[in-house]
């Protein structure tokens, strides 16, 4: 599964590349249909098991549109998140993203992580070797069911995914890592209050990943993201890293890593 390289902080992807990148994602959808056919003809047990997982996920994912969510994600008939180790397609490949964020560099041994609006939870899956426990939640039951199927296939009993809106999530636990990618855009909580919640979720010395909302442009990101990120960070965080990426070929995004 091909990936678009990260862009350095402060730079933009040239708009002239948009059609080429869009073609890449369309090609990925066609390639996956071919892969699905080949997996079904595989002789090895490992590939047959993988084919069974893919079939199960396609069945689950077919119910996503029926959820009638206010916000839904995914382009070219692909899910939003992809997971390269299991050849699961998606417009945003999880391992490629993790390679850009480099979150594991900031995690202690036996780390605990929370992913707010986790989609399939594939960022937690990718970080699983570094985690004692990973918790994620998303409003979409289909997304969570896909993630749980993958966690079961991988034997990741320490990854816990559930379906609920943000206002129903309550925990007294604290985490070494809190992932909050673009969720500030849709959870319906004032940014200052959301920043305070993130601060409460974090252990002392823990980190938060913030990411801007894509706006279907490769030369700009969410309006006033810097101001929004500063508001959330003002709850008691220091900024330890800023970066950017255009991993789906459609949306330029910026991210901040904060430390409590």
Image: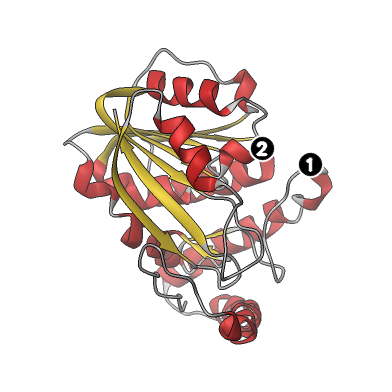
Q: Residue at x 57, y 58 (%)?
A: 221
- The C terminus: image quadrant: top left
Q: Is residue 170 above or below residue 1?
A: above
Helix, strand or loop under label 1: loop
Q: Is residue 17 above or below residue 54?
A: below
Residue 38 lies, in percent from the top left, at 56, 82
Left or right of 112, for residue 191: right
Q: Is residue 117 above or below residue 14?
A: above
Residue 83 lies, in percent from the top left, at 47, 61
Residue 11 lies, in percent from the top left, at 42, 69
Circle number at residue 26: none
Q: Are marks 1 and 2 in contact (CB under 8 Å)?
A: yes
Q: Residue at x 25, y 48 (%)?
A: 104
Circle number at residue 186: 2
Q: Residue at x 46, y 55 (%)?
A: 254
Foreground tag (1 vs 2):
2
Tell how many labels: 2
* Label 1 CA crowd tier, 10 Å (few <14, some 14–19, many 20+): few
Q: Is residue 19 above or below residue 257?
A: below
Left or right of 27, for residue 5: left
Residue 233 lies, in percent from the top left, at 40, 32
* Label 2 CA crowd tier, 10 Å (few <14, some 14–19, many 20+): few
Q: Nearer the viewer, residue 5 or 46?
A: 5
Left or right of 249, for residue 173: left
Earlier in the chain: of badge 1 and badge 2, it is 1
> Would you name the residue on which mark 1 appears?
70
Q: Nearer the viewer, residue 248 or 41?
A: 248
Q: CA distance from mark 1 to mark 2?
A: 9 Å
């Amino acid at each position: 599964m091909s990936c678009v390289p990260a862009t350095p902080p402060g730079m933009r992807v040239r708009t002239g590349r948009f059609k080429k990148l869009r073609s890449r994602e369309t090609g990925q959808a066609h390639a996956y249909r071919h892969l699905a056919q080949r997996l079904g003809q595989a002789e090895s047990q490992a590939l047959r098991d993988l084919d069974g997982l893919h079939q199960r996920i396609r069945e689950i994912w077919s119910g996503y549109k029926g959820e009638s969510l206010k916000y839904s994600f995914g382009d070219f008939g692909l899910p939003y998140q992809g997971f390269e180790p299991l050849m699961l397609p998606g417009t945003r490949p999880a391992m490629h993203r993790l390679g850009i964020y480099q979150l594991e560099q900031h995690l202690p041994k036996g780390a605990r992580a929370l992913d707010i609006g986790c989609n399939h939870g594939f960022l937690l899956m990718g970080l699983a070797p570094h985690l004692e426990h990973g918790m994620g939640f998303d409003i979409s039951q289909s997304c969570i069911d896909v993630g749980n199927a993958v966690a079961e296939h991988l034997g990741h009993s320490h990854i816990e995914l559930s379906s609920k809106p943000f206002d129903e999530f309550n925990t007294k636990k604290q985490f070494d890592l809190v992932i909050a990618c673009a969720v500030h855009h849709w959870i319906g909580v004032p940014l200052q209050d959301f920043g305070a919640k993130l601060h409460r979720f974090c252990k002392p010395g823990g980190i938060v990943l913030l990411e801007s909302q894509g706006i279907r442009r490769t030369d700009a990101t969410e309006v006033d993201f810097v101001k929004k990120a500063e508001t959330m960070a003002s709850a008691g965080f220091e900024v330890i890293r800023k970066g950017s990426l255009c991993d789906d070929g459609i949306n330029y995004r910026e991210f901040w890593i904060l430390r409590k």
